[in-house]
Image (cartoon, helix red, strand yellow):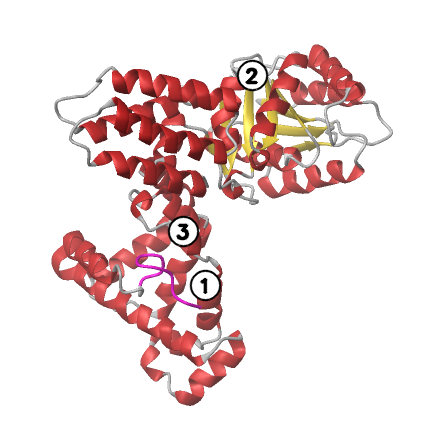
């Protein structure tokens, strides 16, 4: 996410970070680079102009703290202005209504609206402990109703059945009645989308809005459409009283134009970001954390929260206990670690939130290929349980059998074994010297290309 923008901004800010003083000349030079980076990221021109003007005003005004170098002060100003553009803080869903709190979802066809309804239902159920019902008023696309039914079953929320022969008004009225009867906390209403904004679509969703009087009206938009996302959101906002925006496919948006344009153009907050296809891939939008990511400073808070949600705590505790007793780190353990990493979105997602990514050479982060972890897991899966527990058993014939079973080469298996041995050494240090030794072990592996994603990905 934001890879190209992070790369360009980091380069521009590196040039000024070593300056002894902030002058109009070196500020102008840095701002030219920042302006170019934002425009290439498809940020709307009025937003870029306003952003540059505000940064220049603050930087030339010598807002330099005693504890910061001039270069650091400039970076701090850029970060603060990035946060201001996207909104000062996360704006939570307003669910303060007589149950059911109704949330109306609007957006163009193909933006991921139906999937977002399921993701939001899961987030409300898991994070907010709410009972949720979902309903589809999209009578123009029969597959949308079936899709929502399947997703509702997957995330474990109520689905209110509807049919293409019904009118959207009748569907939502019946759904509200059923939600009240079942004492449901939140009712999520999926509406019809179109390929473009049109009068018929706006009239229909406007009618549904007047009928439902929802507490929240969220506009779902594809982040990869850049500033077009902001312009479409503005068109909807003029026809509907939107309360917020959900950016979908943000994990595929290397530019970031939508995230930086939507708030300023519509005046409505971005409330959530879709960060993948799975139903748990929805994150509340925190402008300060996103600004930190854009500047290559990472987002440890989001990483920790994601780990708390997705990492299997029982497996982690069992592994920690194993290390404390001095037992070895076998290939079963290695496979578990790969699976935990996959559950957190893979190495690319983790690296996106790690501090210091802006200091990597240009394009380095883009070279991380999560497919490598699938191949590594396939190799381990092709082993017998005895081989996983005791990798020293692997002779030439066993290795050939494993490679045939996993569709890989002998050098891939040898590379995996080398990485496993390096991790074994690192884990042993946990027993004797605790976390400090473990971190030193990690540092020693960085740059060897041995640990996946540390000094460059394994070359599968």
Report the magenta residues as a range. Answer: 451-460
Q: Is residue 57 above or below residue 110?
A: above
Residue under circle 3? Answer: 363
Q: Secondary structure at mark 1?
A: helix
Q: Which mark is residue 372?
A: 1
Q: Is residue 179 magenta?
A: no
Where residue 227 sits: x, y (%)? 56, 28
Front residue of 55 and 351: 55
Q: Secondary structure at mark 2?
A: loop
Residue under circle 2? Answer: 243
Which mark is first along the chain, 2 or 1? 2
Which mark is first along the chain, 3 or 2? 2
Quadrant position of residue 14:
top left
Name which residue lies at 74% across and 37% down.
144
Q: CA distance from mark 1 to mark 2?
A: 41 Å
Q: Secondary structure at mark 3?
A: loop
Q: Is residue 456 magenta?
A: yes
Magenta highlight: main SS:
loop
Residue 10 shown left or right of residue 160 in the figure = left
Residue most extreme to the front: 25
Name which residue lies at 79% across and 35% down.
141
| Quarter of the image that includes the C terminus | bottom left
Q: Is residue 91 visible?
A: no
Front residue of 204 and 100: 204
Q: Is residue 33 visible?
A: yes
Q: Is residue 11 above or below residue 181?
A: below
């Amino acid at each position: 996410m934001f890879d190209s923008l992070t790369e360009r901004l980091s380069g521009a800010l590196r040039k000024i970070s070593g300056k002894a003083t902030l002058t109009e000349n070196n500020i102008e030079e840095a701002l030219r680079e920042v302006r170019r980076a934002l425009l290439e990221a498809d940020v709307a021109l009025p937003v870029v102009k306003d952003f540059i003007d505000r940064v220049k005003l603050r930087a030339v005004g010598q807002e330099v703290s005693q504890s910061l170098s001039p270069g650091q002060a400039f970076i701090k100003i850029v970060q603060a202005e990035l946060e201001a553009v996207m909104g000062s803080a996360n704006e939570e869903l307003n669910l303060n209504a007589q149950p059911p709190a109704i949330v109306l979802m609007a957006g163009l066809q193909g933006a991921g609206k139906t999937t977002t309804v399921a993701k939001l239902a899961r987030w409300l159920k898991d994070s907010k402990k709410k009972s949720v019902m979902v309903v589809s008023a999209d009578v123009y696309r029969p597959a949308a109703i079936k899709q929502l039914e399947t997703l509702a079953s997957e995330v474990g929320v109520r689905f209110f059945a509807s049919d293409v022969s019904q009118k959207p008004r009748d569907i939502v009225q019946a759904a509200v009645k059923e939600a009240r009867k079942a004492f449901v906390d939140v009712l999520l209403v999926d509406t019809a989308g179109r390929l473009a904004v049109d009068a018929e679509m706006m009239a229909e969703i406007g009618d549904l809005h007047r009928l439902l009087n929802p507490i929240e009206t969220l506009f779902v938009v594809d982040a990869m459409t850049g500033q077009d996302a902001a312009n479409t959101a503005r068109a909807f906002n003029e026809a509907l009283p939107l309360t917020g925006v959900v950016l979908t496919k943000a994990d595929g948006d290397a530019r970031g134009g939508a995230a930086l344009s939507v708030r300023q153009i519509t005046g409505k907050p971005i409330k959530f970001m879709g960060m993948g296809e799975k139903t748990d891939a929805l994150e509340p939008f925190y402008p300060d954390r996103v600004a930190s990511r854009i500047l290559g400073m990472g987002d440890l808070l989001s990483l920790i929260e994601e780990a708390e949600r997705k990492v299997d705590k029982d497996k982690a505790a069992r592994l920690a206990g194993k290390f404390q007793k001095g037992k070895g780190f076998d290939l079963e353990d290695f496979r578990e670690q790969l699976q935990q990493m996959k559950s957190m979105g893979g190495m690319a997602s983790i690296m996106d939130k790690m501090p210091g990514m802006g200091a990597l050479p240009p394009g380095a982060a883009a070279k991380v290929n999560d497919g490598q972890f699938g191949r590594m897991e396939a190799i381990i899966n092709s082993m017998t349980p005895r081989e996983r527990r005791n990798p020293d058993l692997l002779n030439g014939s066993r290795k050939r059998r494993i490679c045939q079973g996993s569709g890989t080469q002998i050098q891939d298996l040898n590379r995996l074994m080398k990485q496993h041995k390096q991790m074994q050494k690192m884990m042993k240090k946990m027993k004797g010297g605790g976390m400090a030794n473990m971190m030193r072990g990690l540092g020693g592996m960085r740059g060897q290309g041995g640990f996946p994603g540390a000094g460059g990905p394994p070359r599968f």
